[in-house]
Image (cartoon, rainbow, N blue to C red):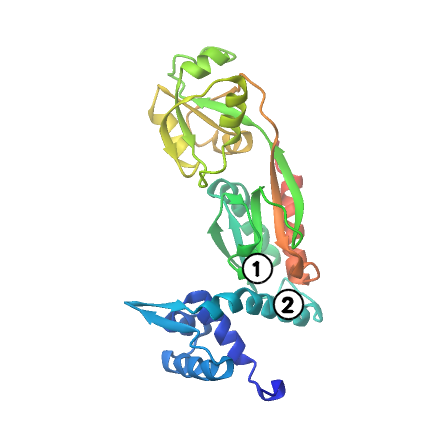
Amino acid sequence: MNLYRLNLNLLIALDSLLLEGSVTLAAKKLFITQAAMSNNLQQLRKIFQDELLVREKNHMVLTTYAKELQPRLHQILQEVHSLVVSGHRFDPATSERTIKIGMSDYMASLLLPKLLLRLQKLAPNIKLITTTVYQLRNVEPFENGDYELGIGKLFAPADQLRTDLLFKDTGVCIINPKHKLAKKKKITLEDYLAGKHVAVRADNPLVTPVIEQTLAKLGYQRDIRIGLPFINPIFRIIEESDELVGTVIEKMALLYKNNHNFLIKPLPFEVPNIEFFLVWHKRYDNDPGHQWLREQIKALFEVYPA
């Protein structure tokens, strides 16, 4: 087929169809009617000589060819987008851009209140969409457009990804003021191991949390009575329980200290520094809007209280 005769808007429609796996959802995403998107799909099937999406029971699934095509197509369109925006001056005061960020609940608690205040003053029309991500383990979500920026612990650096270290943190214990250890200035390792714990469990069973790694090297394990997929409820649980011990990152403990009734105690053993990174795909290196937002995020953590 002659490329000059191809309507490139069809590729944008195809990108949405393959990402959403649904004619209805793809149409909503591009603000067109379902009939128009169905017509796009028929044209795309002729162009690529493949069904692309086929119905199985009550939903649509991608063909084998479409699965292979999807990441390549999405990356090409993202590069075209970067090519276009890099040629324009970015003005945060007037930009209406939407940026997707992957981060954990505790990172959202640390970052978003301060970032949104800054955006209200400097870039009032920029929109942020957040996706819950606890561990940045692979490049696929960046290539597929699940999020443009990732903030968190990086487990699998890749050549396609760029990183900036935002901050390092350590773990601390939090307990109820009525806990039997409350009057002790320091908790001993024996105290810690004898306690009943509420803890965040890794969302990936192949990744062991740093506390478990450290204790295992010492030949111990803690007695976890409540395992959670996220950190925020721990502070409320500790407020209500005079038996449980929580272990959280220090910045989160300090952030919540004024609004929750708990005591902070140092850990009775050394843990490696926990590093949190700002991560993005290399295709956004020269994207002026992306560069601007990255600088705002880095600036916030540079002045964040230790």
Q: Secondary structure at mark 1?
A: helix
Local crowd size for mark 2, using a 10 Å CA cut-off: few (<14), some (14–19), many (≥20): some
Comparing 172 with 20, the one in front is 20
Give the image location of residue 274, x and y in percent: 59, 33
Q: Which mark is residue 143?
A: 1
- Classify residue 49 as left or right of residue 2: left
Comparing 124 with 150, the one in front is 150
Give the image location of residue 157, x and y in percent: 63, 46
Q: Residue at x 54, y 21 (%)?
A: 217
Q: Residue at x 63, y 37 (%)?
A: 167
Q: Amino acid at mark 1?
A: Glu
Q: Secondary structure at mark 2?
A: helix
Q: Amino acid at mark 2?
A: Glu
The span from disc 2 to disc 1 (Cα, nearest Å) is 11 Å
Q: Give the quarter of the figure containing the N terminus.
A: bottom right
Whether residue 249 is situated above or below residue 62 in the rendered picture = above
- Classify residue 45 as left or right of residue 276: left
Q: Which residue is mark 2?
A: 79
Give the image location of residue 161, x and y in percent: 64, 52
Comparing 180 with 217, the one in front is 217
